[in-house]
Image (spheres, helix red, strand yellow):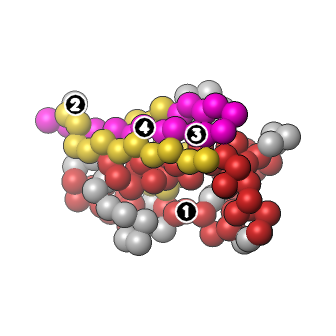
Amino acid sequence: MRIIGLGVDLAEIARVDRVLERFPRFADRCFTEHERAYASRFAKPARRYAARFAGKEAVMKSLGTGWRRLRWTEIEITGGGKPTVRLSGRAAARADQLGVSEVLVTITHTDTTALVMAVAVGEH
């Protein structure tokens, strides 16, 4: 296994909460149905949304792209237990182009911020 790309991103939970309140369609535009269902199970869903938002940015960085080249919903960060990444559409095509077989993520957060690191890996 070799590292193909590395990405990290930090999101402020309060900022994501304000965006969710001000722009209700934000959740639909940026998160998959699975991610929305996961976040809604918690009393403070903004914490989970912030972690997934940072995760998507970190994955994009690990694939060497920005958010203008991929759709937010083409990257799904699963919840509960070990987080995993599911790619579709252009994100999956970019991973194939690079020889990425898996994107590993780790998520941590405090009361104010969420931090995610993503490592795109492939075979030798």
Say which residue label 1 marks: 73
**Main SS type for the magenta part?**
strand
Q: CA distance from mark 3 to mark 4?
A: 10 Å
Q: Is residue 67 left or right of residue 93?
A: right
- Return the residue nearer the eye: 101 or 82: 82
Please report whichever mark, 2 or 3, sits nearer to the chain's N-terminal start. Answer: 2
Please report whichever mark, 1 or 4, sits nearer to the chain's N-terminal start. Answer: 1
Query: Measured from the top left, where is residue 36 in percent x and y?
Result: 72, 54
Q: Which residues are magenta?
A: 107-124
Q: CA distance from mark 2 to mark 4?
A: 18 Å
Q: CA distance from mark 2 to mark 3?
A: 28 Å
Q: Is residue 114 magenta?
A: yes
Q: Nearer the viewer, mark 2 or mark 1?
A: 1
Say which residue label 2 marks: 1
Residue 28 badge: none
Say which residue label 4 marks: 117
Amino acid type, residue under disc 1 in the picture: Thr
Within 10 Å of disc 3 (Cα), the crowding (few <14, some 14-19, many 20+) is: many
- Return the residue nearer the eye: 69 or 19: 19
Residue 114 badge: 3
Q: Nearer the viewer, mark 2 or mark 3?
A: 3
Is label 3 in contact with label 4 (beta carbons under 8 Å)? no
